[in-house]
Image (cartoon, helix red, strand yellow):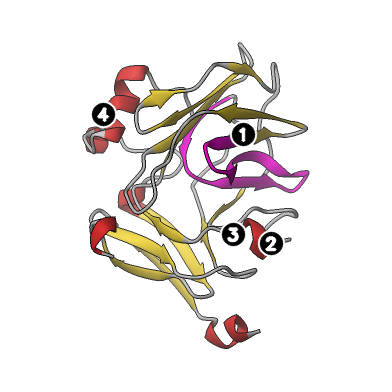
Amino acid sequence: MTFLLLLFILVTYFYLYGKMLTFPAVSESAHVKVMPDLSKDLDAVTVCIVSFATPDNPNAFLLFKPENNVFEVDHTKGFVLFYGLEAKLNQWNSICATWESGNGIAQVWVNGNPSARKGLGHGLKISGAPSIVLGQDQDSYGGGFDKAQSFVGMITDVHMWDSVLSYYDIALYKANLLMKSPGTVINWGALDFSVQGHVVVEDQISATNA
């Protein structure tokens, strides 16, 4: 396929504030792999927006949009669907998911609007060395990509916390005011990552001017 001719790898670590990742075409290979400094199990998560696999489970935590106005959150052996949350075309959208082991509750937020709260992974933890990928759904640890499930568009300000953020903090994230409290697992401002395939790192622009 043509995409195989465009493969390159970039490994870097620098401030990405004001930058974005552009995924310009459907692909079975283009993705960004994030290497977090994580040495503990996770029993709570807030993330915007990611595929998180462990050696034992390719969908240890996954935030996925299978169709318009539908969002899917996977955790270990189960998943839940959230309906009626609109992500607008050709505009920036703030999309976050939260999950907590203690109460087994998952929730999705789109542009500051919360979904219903649904049960998922009660009492479970996310264990094992993570493979965290942007732009693809991992069907195996670090791979198993399907171009029909690939992301096309622009991504910026990806953060992941090892706790459930409050409604107030998620509202701050939507308003781009969360720089005082960046992600504890993934921090867009200090990201160790590799780019594989046709993904472009560039200055953040208005989606309507793309």
Q: Contact, CB < 8 Å: mark 3 with mark 2?
A: yes
**Which residue is label 2 attached to?**
145
Q: Residue flagged by tag 4: what amino acid is it? A: Leu
Q: Residues within 10 Å of mark 2 (few under 14, many from 20)?
A: some
* Quadrant, the C terminus: bottom left
Mark 1 lies on a secondary structure that is: strand
**CB-based contact (under 8 Å), mark 2 and mark 4:** no
Q: Which residue is mark 4?
A: 172
Work out whether 137 lies above or below 2: above
Q: Main secondary structure of the magenta part?
A: strand
Q: Could you give the CA–CA distance between mark 2 and mark 4, rounded to whole angstroms?
A: 33 Å
Q: Mark 3 or mark 2: which comes first in sequence?
A: 2
| Residue position marked by numbered label 3 in the rendering | 150
Number of the label disc, if any, that sits on residue 73: 1
Q: Start and end of the magenta stretch?
A: 44-72
Front-lying residue, 12 or 72: 72
The residue that appears at 37% across and 18% down in the rendered structure is: 166
